[in-house]
Image: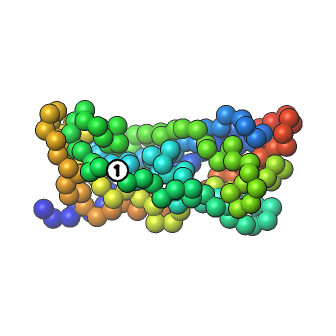
């Protein structure tokens, strides 16, 4: 199979609310738009779209804008796990998502960094502004043209990932987002 040209995917980040006090519920969202001519199915496990894992690895960056110091975000390299399955409805089905051409798909979850108020390079400091972004070189290694139900193996047929549909899709031009950690017990303003 000849390698297909990797289609571009536009990524936008958001943190809501952008100003918060320690312990607040804060949401991180990543919106993806495929610029392919046909639907694409991507495997999200080792990517920024798997928000729970990605926020504990080196997928993102965060810089304290008051000190220009980067925060240490990596708390794990990610656990070892058995081989992935490409079975429709199987154990890894949730990690496959179809991106329709030009239709936004949003991946959202808790912004874990919002509750990290310990000391040192791992901590957010109340009163400081931060810039949160995606690490250079992030992307999707496994993708195929077609909808999920067309590219995954039928139910009951265990299949490994197999070959990707082309070269990895590397994300480019992702704008970082700023947020501010308010002093505890202060009123959170929405600037």
Q: Residue 145 location, x and y as percent?
A: 23, 49
Q: Residue at x 78, y 39 (%)?
A: 21
Q: Residue 38 location, x and y as percent?
A: 26, 46
Residue 134 seen by the camera: no
Q: Secondary structure at mark 1?
A: loop
156 is higher (above) or lower (below) than 119: above
In the displayed structure image, the side of residue 25 where residue 44 appears, left or right? left
Q: Nearer the viewer, residue 118 or 37?
A: 118
188 is higher (above) or lower (below) than 130: above
| Local crowd size for mark 1, using a 10 Å CA cut-off: few (<14), some (14–19), many (≥20) | few
Residue 16 seen by the camera: yes
24 is higher (above) or lower (below) than 73: above
Q: How is the image coloured?
A: rainbow
Look at mark 1 in the image and give the residue it sits on: 81
Q: Which corner quadrant holds the N terminus?
A: bottom left
Q: Nearer the viewer, residue 153 or 84?
A: 84
In the displayed structure image, the side of residue 24 where residue 1 appears, left or right? left
Q: Residue 27 location, x and y as percent?
A: 61, 38
Q: Nearer the viewer, residue 117 or 108?
A: 117
């Amino acid at each position: 199979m000849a390698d297909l040209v990797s289609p571009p995917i536009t990524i936008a980040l958001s943190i809501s609310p952008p100003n918060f006090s320690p312990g607040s519920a804060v949401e991180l969202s990543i919106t993806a738009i495929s610029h392919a001519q046909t639907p694409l199915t991507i495997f999200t496990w080792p990517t920024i779209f798997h928000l729970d894992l990605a926020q504990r690895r080196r997928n993102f960056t965060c810089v304290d804008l008051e000190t220009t110091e980067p925060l240490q975000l990596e708390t794990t390299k990610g656990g070892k796990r058995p081989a992935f399955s490409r079975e429709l409805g199987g154990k890894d089905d949730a990690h496959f998502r179809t991106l329709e051409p030009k239709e936004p798909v949003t991946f959202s979850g808790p912004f874990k960094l919002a509750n990290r108020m310990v000391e040192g390079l791992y901590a957010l400091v109340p009163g400081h502004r931060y810039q949160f972004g995606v690490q250079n070189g992030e992307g999707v290694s496994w993708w195929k043209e077609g909808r999920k139900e067309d590219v995954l193996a039928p139910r009951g047929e265990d299949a490994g990932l197999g070959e990707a549909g082309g070269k990895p899709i590397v994300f480019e031009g992702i704008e970082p987002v700023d947020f501010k950690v308010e002093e505890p017990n202060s009123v959170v303003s929405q600037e």
